[in-house]
């Protein structure tokens, strides 16, 4: 602690062109702030984030021997990193910096120039009060073990494994079942180009099995992964033999489970023998002959979409691939049995993706009847037809576009079942420390900008365990994760969070409340001393423990009590003047 | 009661001239742009849907295709080129065959060969009857020519004989038309059990007349401005046709005279006017269908051509007959009269009850039935009437 040193603060008020200057009297603000205690210099400038703006800060730090800086500009989400870098360039610790947001919090949201100006001053005063208590924090990094653990041997896991192994890095590929390939192995052709799935996946599987850098463990499950980014370890028991693995990163590629169509009572799956799921029908197609259960060539085949998808009673999300799979089925049936009537009962045809709208377009010209149903409130009812109906099954429902009550004859009904998370998704999430959403799919760190990483450093989620997706999307994710991992292996080390929590062992009473609330399982209990201990590599500095700690023993770096309290005081200080 | 879907109905409709409207994905642009759409009548999307789903019963009781004015706006707006306008016309052909309880219409629409055969058979029958009951002007030409130089036509083909034939034919046609319209009513109004049409409602159709003879109102919202010309020429043609029909069927004694009347006499004037109407109409519609300059002439079923060709031949032989008669050429008059009848009778017998011509009857009745339907729906509060 060096609170005794003289504090020399530089304050910079940004115009942001006219964004701030139009509503806030920046020149006046900058002049008045000059008078606050410890403020050595106060300036306003058109664009603080520009190179000349940053240079201004660097020069002043050197010239006026500043040791703390406040920039009043936009949101810290926008430019905090920019200005921290500027401080670093001037030889100052980047954490000796505070930002006052006078754009989003003042100029953009107010219409009264006088009031907005006053608020801007208050916000800057708060930042000045806070920055006095800032401390230097040092960056830390850990070394990375170049091996990678991949959980799941489907198309995603295989793709990631080959990508990493081809870069000459060790991969441990752990698969729960007895074969590699996952669900892709069980399908006949892929959409939209109707290529054989078997040819594609068999080639990949043999590459994996013969790769010198990939160790494959079949019939094996992961119970618990210990450690932190760069330095994980786990124990597996393939064939009853215990093996200890050390690795630097983890890819979770555990895949999906098809929806259990028995849950939708209307469709009679499991009771009516000729009502089958899309998974069953893939087997029918692979067998090479399309016949009903009683061995007849079907005259009418109906396909029902959204089984278990987009309905509050089952799963509310869209499974993304079923529409195109249905179109693929139609084309395959049409080729095999040109005389068979096909009825496609759908809700919305979701034909996004390369080549998919084209597939829809081609299919719609193949003499298929497309019928719509209400997937939310009015599911079709399937019943056994009577002897005079000249078909096996009858599907009754209200057609949505025409509002007519209709019945559709069918000898085979194919239910397009959606994708669901595995039953053991929760165990996997605990084993590797990733979180699950309401549908038990694993959550990525950022839905747009960081789609394969998770909130646990070094753990990546790819493929259908993250959300329903098709093969190209799964492969893209797998290879993206591989690229991320290879980058960390290449650099040999990764930076870890600086603003972590620390326990003052003298005050800690050992109540362990913090251990229960920590979302990153970063806190453990030191039995011998009877106190809590924060693993600073796992800690993300969220502050939950700090605010829960009844004795005040936990300090969140950069968010200390004194920093926050003085910020509040600073906010109120100008009111009295 | 739910209706069974039928994938093959649309394949049947291809025979009635329909194009590939499987392209339709029910966006509803056609309904939005259609000026005929109003509460309770959703043009033409609903009809397209019925066709795609093969709902035979709904389609057979559907009145919408008759209300369509074929302006073509829907086909122009269609993002998938599914041609809803042409579909409406194909369904009209289908409905003509549905209303015809004899089943002949269905055969004639579906087979070009049968239609031509029917025309030929009728022509041969007419020829036999004509040869049996008329006298060929043999021997001295002078005895077949009157003092004013005109052929003594009643001497070779007495108007009474022809008139009897006309009346027999007209009787048959009226019988078929009346029974077919009754069947149409049965399908559209009677079979719809949700509809409650009171007896008094049937007596209030007169406001409709304005609708039929009010093209400005009918086409005001359509993009295609050529439709006004189209409407005017169509009306001219239809009136000329009707005039000629009434004259030859009911006033043949007055029309078929041995004396050559002066050119300003109503007999000749009316004859010339309706001939001009027929010729102008035929040329206009023939050109339209050939150069396909409007939506409503882009697609032609073979029955459209048959009607035009027969009408043209009838008109042409009629003109020749007239001139051969007034310029005193008895043999030519005799032969031309035969050919004239051999074209005219099959045209009427085939086209009026079984084919394209019947739209002249069904279209006004459909407006009437639609009116009844709408009144009933408003009364049952199934639709709210537009105050506009």
Image (spheres, coloured by chain):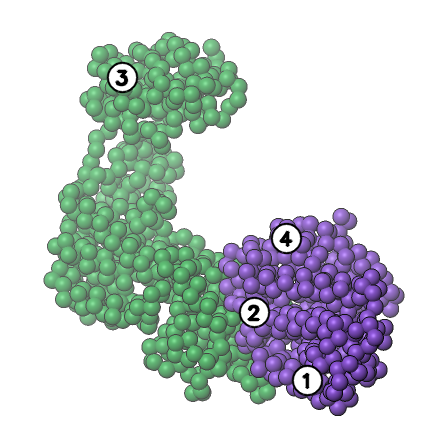
How far apart marks 2 and 3 lie (CA) works out to 77 Å
Residue B317 visible, this orientation: yes
Horizontal arrangement in the rendering, residue A107 relative to residue A405 (left or right): left
Q: Which residue is mark 4?
A: B226
Tell me if residue B1 comes above or below residue A323 in the rendering: below
Label 4 Cα neighbours within 10 Å, binned few <14 / some 14-19 / many ≥20: few
Q: Which residue is mark 1?
A: B122
Q: Colour of chain B?
A: purple
Dot 2 or dot 4, earlier in sequence: 2
Q: Which residue is mark 3?
A: A56
Report the front residue among A138 and A3. Answer: A138
Q: Nearer the viewer, mark 1 or mark 3?
A: 1
* Badge 1 element: helix
How far apart marks 1 and 2 lie (CA) works out to 29 Å
Which quadrant of the rendered structure holds the N terminus of chain A? Answer: top left
Chain ID for label 4?
B
Label 3 Cα neighbours within 10 Å, binned few <14 / some 14-19 / many ≥20: some
Q: Tell me which chain appears green.
A: A
Q: Which residue is mark 2?
A: B18
- Marks 2 and 4 belong to one chain: yes
């Amino acid at each position: 602690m060096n609170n005794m040193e003289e504090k020399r603060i530089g304050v910079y008020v940004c115009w942001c062109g006219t964004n701030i200057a139009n509503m806030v009297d920046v020149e006046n603000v900058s002049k008045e702030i000059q008078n606050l205690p410890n403020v050595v210099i106060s300036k306003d400038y058109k664009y603080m984030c520009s190179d000349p703006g940053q240079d201004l800060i660097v020069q002043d730090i050197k010239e006026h021997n500043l040791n703390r800086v406040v920039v009043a500009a936009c949101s810290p989400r926008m430019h905090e990193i920019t200005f921290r870098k500027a401080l670093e360039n001037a030889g100052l610790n980047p954490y000796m910096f505070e930002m006052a947001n006078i754009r989003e919090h003042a100029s953009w949201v107010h219409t009264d120039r006088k009031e907005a100006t006053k608020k801007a001053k208050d916000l800057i005063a708060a930042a000045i009060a806070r920055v006095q208590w800032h401390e230097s924090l040092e960056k830390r990094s850990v070394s990375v073990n170049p091996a990678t653990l991949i959980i799941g041997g489907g198309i995603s896991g295989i793709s990631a494994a080959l990508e990493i192994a081809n870069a000459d890095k060790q991969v441990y590929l752990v698969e729960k079942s007895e074969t590699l390939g996952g669900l892709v192995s069980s399908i006949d052709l892929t959409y939209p180009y109707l290529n054989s799935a078997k040819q594609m996946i068999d080639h990949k599987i043999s590459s994996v099995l013969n790769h010198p850098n990939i160790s494959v463990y079949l019939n094996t499950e992961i119970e618990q992964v210990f450690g932190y980014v760069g330095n994980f370890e786990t124990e597996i028991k393939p064939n009853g033999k215990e093996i200890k693995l050390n690795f630097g990163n983890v890819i979770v590629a555990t895949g999906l489970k098809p929806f259990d169509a028995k849950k939708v009572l209307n469709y009679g799956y499991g009771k009516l023998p000729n009502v089958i799921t899309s998974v069953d029908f893939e087997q029918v197609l692979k067998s090479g002959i399309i016949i009903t259960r009683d061995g007849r060539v079907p005259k009418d085949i109906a396909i029902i979409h959204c089984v278990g998808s987009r309905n509050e009673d089952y799963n509310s999300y869209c499974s993304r691939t079923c529409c195109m799979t249905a179109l693929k089925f139609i084309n395959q049936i049409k080729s095999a049995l040109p005389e068979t009537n096909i009825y496609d009962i759908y809700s919305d045809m979701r034909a996004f993706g390369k080549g998919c709208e084209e597939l829809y377009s081609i299919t719609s010209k193949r003499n298929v009847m497309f019928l719509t149903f209400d997937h939310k409130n009015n599911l079709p009812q399937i019943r056994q037809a009577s002897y005079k109906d000249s078909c096996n099954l009858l599907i009754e429902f209200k057609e949505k576009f025409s509002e007519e009550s209709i019945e559709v004859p069918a000898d085979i009904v194919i239910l397009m079942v959606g994708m669901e998370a595995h039953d053991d998704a929760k165990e996997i999430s605990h084993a590797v420390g990733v979180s699950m959403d309401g549908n038990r799919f694993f959550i990525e760190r950022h839905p747009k900008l960081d789609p394969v990483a998770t909130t646990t450093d070094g753990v990546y989620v790819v493929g259908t365990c993250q959300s329903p997706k098709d093969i190209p999307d799964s492969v893209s994710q797998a290879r993206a994760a591989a690229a991320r991992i290879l980058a960390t292996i290449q650099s040999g080390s990764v930076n870890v969070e600086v603003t972590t929590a620390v326990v003052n062992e003298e005050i800690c009473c050992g109540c362990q409340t913090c251990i229960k609330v920590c979302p990153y399982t970063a806190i453990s209990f030191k039995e011998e001393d009877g106190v809590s201990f924060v693993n600073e590599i796992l800690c993300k500095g969220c502050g939950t423990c700090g605010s829960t700690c009844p004795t005040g023993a936990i300090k969140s770096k950069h968010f200390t009590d004194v920093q926050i309290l003085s910020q509040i005081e600073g906010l109120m200080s100008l009111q009295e003047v | 009661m739910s209706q069974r879907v039928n994938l093959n109905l649309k394949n049947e409709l291809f025979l009635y001239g329909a194009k590939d409207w499987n392209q339709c994905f029910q966006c509803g642009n056609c309904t939005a742009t259609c000026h005929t759409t109003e509460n309770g009548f959703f043009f033409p999307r609903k009809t397209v849907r019925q066709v795609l789903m093969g709902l035979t019963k709904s389609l057979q009781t559907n009145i919408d295709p008759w209300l369509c004015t074929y302006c073509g706006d829907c086909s122009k707006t269609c993002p998938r080129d599914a041609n809803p306008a042409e579909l409406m016309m194909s369904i009209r052909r289908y409905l003509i065959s549905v209303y015809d309880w004899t089943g002949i219409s269905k055969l004639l629409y579906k087979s070009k060969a049968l239609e031509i055969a029917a025309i030929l058979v009728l022509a041969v029958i007419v020829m036999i009857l004509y040869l049996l009951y008329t006298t060929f002007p043999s021997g001295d030409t002078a005895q077949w020519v009157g003092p004013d130089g005109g052929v003594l036509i009643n001497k070779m083909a007495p108007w009474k004989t022809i008139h009897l034939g006309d009346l027999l034919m007209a009787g048959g046609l009226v019988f078929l038309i009346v029974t077919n319209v009754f069947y149409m009513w049965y399908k559209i109004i009677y079979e719809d059990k949700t509809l409650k049409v009171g007896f008094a409602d049937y007596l209030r159709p007169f406001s409709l007349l304005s609708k039929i003879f009010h093209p400005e109102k009918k086409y005001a919202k359509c993009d295609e401005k050529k439709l006004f010309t189209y409407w005017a020429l169509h009306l001219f043609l239809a009136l000329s046709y009707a005039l000629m029909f009434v004259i030859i069927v009911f006033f043949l004694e007055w029309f078929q005279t041995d004396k050559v009347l002066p050119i300003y006499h109503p007999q000749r004037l009316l004859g010339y006017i309706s001939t001009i109407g027929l010729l102008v109409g035929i040329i206009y519609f023939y050109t339209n269908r050939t150069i396909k300059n409007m939506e409503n002439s882009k697609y032609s079923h073979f029955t459209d051509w048959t009607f035009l060709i027969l009408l043209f031949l009838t008109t042409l032989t009629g003109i020749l007959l007239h001139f051969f008669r007034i310029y005193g050429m008895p043999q030519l008059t005799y032969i031309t009269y035969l050919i004239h009848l051999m074209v005219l009778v099959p045209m009427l017998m085939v086209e009026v009850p079984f084919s394209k011509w019947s739209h002249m009857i069904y279209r006004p009745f459909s407006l009437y039935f639609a009116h009844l339907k709408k009144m009933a729906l408003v009364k049952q509060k199934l639709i709210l009437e537009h105050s506009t």
